[in-house]
Image (cartoon, rainbow, N blue to C red):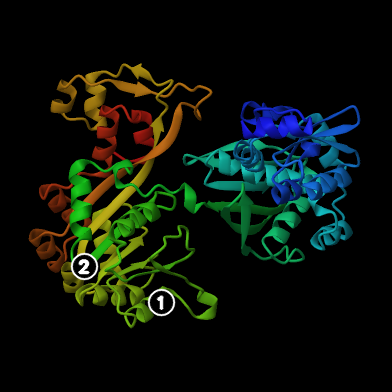
Amino acid sequence: MKMNKISSSFGLPFIDISCLDTTIISDELINSKLIEKHRCLPLRKRNNRLLLAISDPNNLVALEEFQFNHGIHVEPIIVVQDALDKVIDRILEGEIDSLEITEEDEQRLAGIDAAETEVKEEAQGSSADDAPVVVFINKLMTEAIRKGASDLHFEPYEDQYRVRFRIDGMLSTIASPPQGLGPRISARIKVMSKLDIAERRLPQDGRIKLRVGNKKMVDFRVSVLPTLFGEKIVMRILDSSAANLNIDILGFSEAQKKLYQDNLQKPQGMILVTGPTGSGKTVSLYTGLNILNTEERNISTAEDPVEINLPGINQVQIHPKAGLGFAEALRSFLRQDPDIVMVGEIRDLETAEIAVKAAQTGHMVMSTLHTNSSPETLTRLLNMGVPAYNIASSVSLIIAQRLGRKLCPSCKAPESIPAAELLQEGFSQEQIATDFTCYKAVGCDNCNGGYKGRVGLYEMLKMTPALASLIMDGGSAIDLAKQAKQDGMTTIREAGLQKVIDGVTSLAEVNRVTSH
């Protein structure tokens, strides 16, 4: 009602911008800095006038700046500011329909000269905001965030240049810009990452902070690697706001969830999470830390890099080149009156020994290792040189995990699999007798090839007296696994098969991420 009065008082039109189809807004009207500064939105040009969505027509500074920027007279359109903010945030977050390069894009990108002089000009920042390469890279980065990608791959080859996103653990090609554009793309990303654009022979690592919408900041960890035909660049997206630390959605069974929570509440000991890169170890650890994060506890973490920011936790970014590694950080933590300590990864004997001593002297220690199963984690610590009696007395729980893709609920379809084949896959006679339904991936507009999102598959090894005795006797990984099974451990494979029974994922996906 108030906006209608303003509209009537000034004789200006009023619209409900929440119903606006943002695809009608031309890219040439989007000046993100100006829009963010004044929270106004150009809608279209009509009869040599720029229609500008604005909530306050008395904001003469905004009207004048948009008029100067676009070079034509501005005609205000009255809108509700809250609704306008949501539309602006959607647009600035890169909500676009497709990343396919149009013929016009091809012409603009192919027309760029990759000469060294121009690269230097871009490094100096001259009119970079309007460069097609800059627009293209920003479009890719914002689209990657919108689609929930974990990584972006920029890959030069002899006859082509390829850009791929990793979504739900799988890589897929998103764009193929002109092959000769590789040096410009590389130079622009290195400028954004504050890296040396003249260095093309050695690997480099950097970071980019991207502002998305009104307040949200997303970090990109950038790795540049010289290859035969140019520099391959991988961006890892570190989006703290996208991490959901709710233990109920991770994929634990009820028994596994209780086991994890019970061990978290112990006054001392060591919880280790293991699995390959990208298997969700960080989220599992931080879910535990989030449960423990109370006013009564002092929690410190050493990470490389700090991926999720949690208020109330003292997080340290390690810098090996400056002499601050995991061991040095952990040693310092023990002089800081800690209750819970999290070490990003146990990589060497020194870190392992300090972590073990901390777990034996009244502290809860949480960390990760790169092993394939929980029993193998015990033998890995032994191979590092940690004495068997220290392992048996300090380790409380080991969690091995994988991430499997979840079937899209909109398009998954029943799959008929013979009972004999189900037995070969590892299902028990009792499970088959329940006459459950297997589902397969189909694919629709709402998913990626029949899958949408991921779920954890977990294997939890609890330290028992029998297992501790076997470690002291020098048991192998096979012996340890057999004993853990006798103690009630569910393997990753068995956890995956249960997800098939529950209709969460497909048998094909379980076979992809686990071994028989």
Looking at the image, which residue is at 45% across and 57% down?
308
Element carrying mark 2: strand
Which image quadrant: the C terminus? top left
Q: Which mark is residue 91?
A: none
Q: Residue 364 appears at what percent x and percent y?
A: 25, 68
Per the image, label 1 sits on a secondary structure element best described as helix
Q: Quadrant of the N terminus?
A: top right
Identified at 29% across, 51% down, the residue is 400
| Residue of label 1 | 329
Q: Is residue 91 above or below residue 273?
A: above
Q: CA distance from mark 1 to mark 2?
A: 19 Å
The location of residue 328, given as percent across then percent down, is 41, 79
What's the mark number on residue 269? 2
Position of 46 with respect to 462 (left or right) is right
96 versus 259 height, above or below: above
**Callout 2, which amino acid?**
Gly
Is residue 181 visible in the rendered image? The answer is no
Which one is earlier in the sequence, the residue at label 1 or at label 2?
2
Crowd class of label 2 (few under 14; some 14 to 19; many from 20; radius 10 Å)? many
Left or right? Give the position of 217 relative to 184: left
User: How far across and down, in percent of the image, does residue 259 sit?
Assistant: 18, 51
